[in-house]
Image: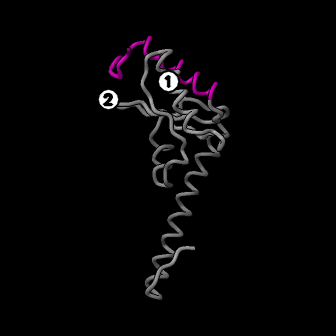
Amino acid sequence: MNTLSDNNSAYEYDLLTAIDIITERILTPVLYMFIDNEAIEFVCFCDSKTCEEDFRATELEIYNAVGICCEIVDIRAFDANDRVEIVSNHQPVYSADDFVRLIFENAMYNDLHQAEEEKRIMIERKNQTGSAYIH
């Protein structure tokens, strides 16, 4: 099994194989990857019909094919702050179309802006009325 510290073309080939497996099994127009010393994480913008079992089966297929342990996660599992961190700091490793990737990334920034605006309004309401409610 390859380790994350391996820095050779065989390991890069294994990562490309893993990306191919993900994009064949999971409908996603954009895929991000994050590697640290302990894990590989793939974050996708996948179809809402994709379930956890699909992720786990794909992770197992990747492990059986190339020996890489990874975790596949849908971006919707994260809050707006984490989504912006992902599109800012994770490596994009697959994009069906660069324009589509930019649309998704802009949507993540807009979601964060909207969440911050809702928080600002709630704090302002609490300061004015003494109570805060969420609609």
Residue 115 sits above or below residue 2 on the image: below
Q: Which residue lies furthest to the bottom in this view?
A: 129
Q: Where is residue 88 in the image (x, y as percent from the top left)?
A: 48, 44
Describe residue 38's horizontal placement relative to residue 63 as left or right. left
> Looking at the rendered structure, which numbered label has been put on residue 14?
none
Describe residue 41's horizontal placement relative to residue 75 as left or right. left
Image: magenta residue range? 1-25
Q: Nearer the viewer, residue 54 or 87?
A: 54
Could you tell me if the residues under marks 1 and 2 are in contact, i.e. CB atoms within 8 Å?
no
Question: Could you tell me which residue is drawn at 49 percent across and 24 percent down?
Answer: 60
Q: Position of residue 74 (x, y in %)?
A: 54, 41
Q: Which dot, 1 or 2, sits closer to the camera? A: 1
Task: Give the quarter of the figure containing the N terminus.
Answer: top left
Q: Nearer the viewer, residue 131 or 101?
A: 131
SS of the residue at dot 1?
Answer: helix
Residue for badge 2 = 37
Task: Name the main secondary structure of what is drawn in magenta.
Answer: helix
Label 2: how many residues lie within 10 Å, few (<14), some (14-19) or many (20+)?
Answer: few
Residue 122 sits above or below residue 63 on the image: below
SS of the residue at dot 2?
Answer: loop
Quadrant position of residue 93: top right
Residue for badge 1 = 60
Question: Could you tell me which residue is drawn at 57 percent across and 57 percent down?
Answer: 111
Question: Could you tell me which residue is drawn at 50 percent across and 65 percent down?
Answer: 116
Q: What residue type is labelled 1?
A: Leu
Label 1: how many residues lie within 10 Å, few (<14), some (14-19) or many (20+)?
Answer: some
Q: Earlier in the sequence, mark 1 or mark 2?
A: 2
- Tally of numbered tags: 2
Question: Could you tell me which residue is drawn at 55 percent across and 53 percent down?
Answer: 109
